[in-house]
Amino acid sequence: MNSKRSTLILSLIICLTSCVKTDPGAKKNTDKGVYEVCIDYGCADPKKTTNCEDAIGFIMDNPGVGAKQIHVQGKFPDNSAISLDLLWDGNPSQTTFSLNEDKVGIGNWGAGAYFPVFGSVQQYNTADGGTGTATVTSYDDANQRISGTFSFKGKYFDGTSFQNTYKEFSGSFINIPIIDPNNPQSLPCAGGTGIGTGTGTGTGTGTGGGTGGGVTTTSVIYKNTTFTDINITVAGTQKLITPGNSASFSGNANLNFTGSASTSGKTSNGAQVGGLFTWNLDGNFPATGSKSIDLNIAKEYFFLKIINQSNKTFNKIYTNYGLTAQTAENLNIPSDGKLYNLGYYKAFTNSNVRAESGTNSWSWNSLALQFVVNQAVTVTANP
């Protein structure tokens, strides 16, 4: 992918146990101006959270941008959180990842984020101007554990748009257990006390047995309001949501879950077109009934569609031609007058599109973007 391709990666929140060197939410290292934290599974300090269910990484296949994708997060005692989203080809051990959206698709890359309030969309993220690195110092594929260090500068996202405010973060993640849905033995939290069902003596997961009371099951429903298929994983269950449709996930009332979703434009053979858009879906099942959540594309992006009515086959498409955020993709679009969906690109008041066929070119310099969520533009090339 072109190094200027932009993508908004709203990092996925995965609950992990955390040891804190200094208070990540309020106490800042005054010498460096950096929040320093330690994400450590099974902390020895009895004052820290040590539940296995709060100490899990998540791994998933993501063939559009790399062989695999892993998410690591530490939730701190003050209810703030650090999240890392890493993508790579092959074994990531001894690998340094660039936490910078301008490096998307160039070797190993990813994103980092700090959430002042766990579960909120407000965050300091390496997208849209943030920078940083994460280094995996140990990756045990057999036992599914990962360790490493990180340092990044995040730009503030207020829930709607990025603001020109930054904070810096650094620390480590130590021996974090990973859930891999493709590996049935990946159950780092198996065992322990059970969850009771029915009345009287219940049956439970793990070695324990629950007792009485019954468990209420509720659901969370995610709707795809975008223009492309969404790959979604919630509480270890993976689904595909086509545009305009929804997926429902059920669990015990009020139970916390981890989740993620991603989408992008794709060619007919599955190669990514435009930027990758990723959602953080960490949350909890409602107390009763169900709750519905729309998966939207932020107003800082637009989806591009193109109709080629010329007598030439396009072999290259530019977006934001001549701008810092310029992208260039070798895409074959035949002159058949059909509508072709491409992908997601950064939206500016002067955003433009350019199509080329050899020495011939077509340009659209005024896209009239409305800067609303889920916006799309269709350009048409005439002879």
Image (cartoon, rainbow, N blue to C red):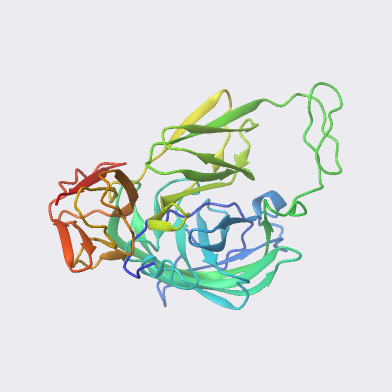
Q: Is residue 284 above or below residue 142?
A: above
Q: Residue furthest top?
A: 199
Q: Is residue 230 above or below residue 209?
A: below
Which residue occupies the foreground of this view, 265 or 11?
265
Residue drawn at x 41%, y 51% is 264
Q: Residue furthest front?
A: 311
Tell me which residue sits at (70%, 65%) in the image: 145
Residue drawn 47% across and 58% down?
A: 25
Report the side of 352 relative to 41 (left or right). left
The N terminus lies in quadrant: bottom left
Q: How many marks?
A: 0
Q: Quick check: 358 left or right of 329? A: left
Residue 64 lies, in percent from the top left, at 49, 58
Q: Is residue 202 left or right of residue 305?
A: right
Q: Nearer the viewer, residue 322 or 200?
A: 322
Q: Position of residue 120 (x, y in %)?
A: 45, 46
- Please indicate whether residue 80 sits to the left or right of residue 327 in the image: right
- Could one spot residue 23 in this view of the protein? no
- Estimate the x, y position of residue 60 in percent, counting from the top left: 60, 55
Residue 2 visible, this angle? yes
Nearer-the-camera pick, 140 or 197: 140
User: Residue at position x 75%, y 24% from top?
Assistant: 214
Relative height, residue 190 to residue 360 (above, below): above
The image quarter containing residue 6 is bottom left
